[in-house]
Image (cartoon, rainbow, N blue to C red):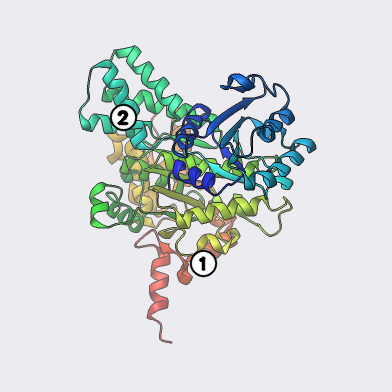
Amino acid sequence: MSFSDEFELLLKARYPLVYISTREEERVEAAIAYSAKRQGNRTIYTWDFVEGYQGNPNDAGFGKRNPLQALELVEKLPATSPAIFVLRDFYRFLEDVAVSRKLRNLARLLKSQPKNIVLLASTITIPNDLSEVLTILEFPLPAPPEIKTEVERLLAALGKPLEERTLDELVRSCQGLSMERIRRVLARAIATAGQLTSEHVDLILEEKRQTIRQTQILEFYPARENISDIGGLDNLKDWLLRRGGAFSERARQYGLPHPKGLLLAGIQGTGKSLTAKAIAHHWHLPLLRLDVGRLFAGLVGESESRTRQMIQLAEALAPCILWIDEIDKAFSGLDGRSDSGTTGRVFGTFITWLAEKTSPVFVVATANNIQTLPPEMLRKGRFDEIFFVGLPTQEERQAIFAVHLSRLRSYNLSSYDLDRLAYETPDFSGAEIEQTIIEAMHIGFSQNRDFTTDDILEAASQIVPLARTAHDQVQFLQDWAASGKARLASKHSSLSCRIQRQLQQPD
């Protein structure tokens, strides 16, 4: 159901107080005016704290700097006169006892009158005593058809039409921006080149990065890593490659639903975050990084509002990859938290969206300590698959050494004994292998020569891998994966062999 349809339904049903959450004041007021016209040309009265009521000469300036007086106009108008009262920034006055009491009195009165009060706000902050009388309605960011209409309007004014393919590319790149930002960035492109072309997509993406940066919730993350940069993890890579075209129109025609996402659980430093970046690069989708800690704020209701804002923004930017790093740290120990249930409500909103979302937002969540995650997170339907990323085998360690050394010393790769390096570094994770090479480079650099295999082995001898320092935790994770609760990311890991032996044992 579109915003206009939902809003008009509330008007017909005589919902007295409607709270609309949006940062696009001008656009939402245009949508309200459109709905008012379709509902029998209802009169609109618009109020703000500085100017009072505007638009109607008889009431111009009424209620200026007086929110309580602004509400009194609702009662002064004839009971049979259909009207909509749009109150800008009125959420700032809801804590006032007189304003709150007046709104509740009006809620009773307007049930029998064709009048509605609409509160416009950039955030959702509702006192408890008004929660039963206010109906929240969120105003979405511009949809592709609306963006396309705006772009075509500008092109008509320029007299320079675009190919359909280029037009679709511009429209897709504008998704996730407010209409005001879209107009501003397109005007900037036109002022720069005198026309719109596919080359201006980068300019639009930069505006998108600026918008996301201002939300302070999501981060537009550059993804330059390739699938080939991941050493090992063959099962996981095969799974990802099979879904490379799942966001295409051809997949929709075939009947495939959009992939939901995956949870990567396992030992630290084994390539979980690298995989998230490689997915975005390989699928040619924007990568949004969510720091779950940024969802939580001090004001009552703000954390839930930020969660809804994050979901709205991610869906507006779809298709995209939403990367949630170390999700276990955000939602561990829900039952024992003393935050008045804020974490539980945020978690509930998030996992409900995970299960029910139909938008092409592919969620990649990583977790190191799987035992602290709530069971609801691991239930089937939240993610398409849960993969366990364990320590690399000798063969995978050799591949990881090859990836790093080919990037750093591609001209001299053959001088390194990869077999020996892999053999001499048991229990090393990918991150520890990378650190070993960096330490070897320091050794060589300090002696004014290139680093060698022996330097890498010397550096490795000085590093104690996590598999030894946190042996109990690593063992727990491997036992958890061996019990069949997750799919193994590697085909030929020692854990795979262990599971095969368990399956072959007679009952």
**How far across and how far down the image is residue 169, in percent?**
28, 32
Dot 2 alpha-carbon crowd within 10 angstroms: few under 14, some 14 to 19, many 20 or more: many
- Residue named by callout 2: 170
Q: Helix or strand or loop: what does disc 1 sit on? A: helix
Residue 447 in sight from this viewpoint: no
- Work out whether residue 350 can be spotted: yes
Foreground mark, 1 or 2, reads: 2
Residue 460: x %, y % from top left: 48, 46
Frontmost residue, 96 versus 267: 96
377 displayed left or right of 489: right
Q: In the picture, residue 204 is in which quadrant?
A: top left
Q: Nearer the viewer, residue 239 or 286?
A: 286
- Count all numbered tags in the image, as a single digit: 2
- Return the x and y of residue 274 as percentages of the image width and height: 42, 44
Q: Which residue is the site of mark 1? A: 480
As measured in the structure, the alpha-carbon distance from the residue carrying label 1 to the one carrying label 2 is 47 Å
Q: In the rendered view, would you say 351 is above or below 113?
A: below
Outermost residue on the right side: it is 97
Label 1, residues with CA under 10 Å away: few <14, some 14-19, many ≥20: some
Amino acid type for the residue under numbered disc 2: Leu
Among the two numbered marks 1 and 2 on one chain, the one whose residue lies closer to the N terminus: 2
Identify the residue at horizontal 42%, vertical 55% (top origin).
262
Q: Quadrant of residue 110?
A: top right
Q: Please state which amino acid type lies under the numbered disc 1.
A: Trp
390, 254: nearer the viewer:
254
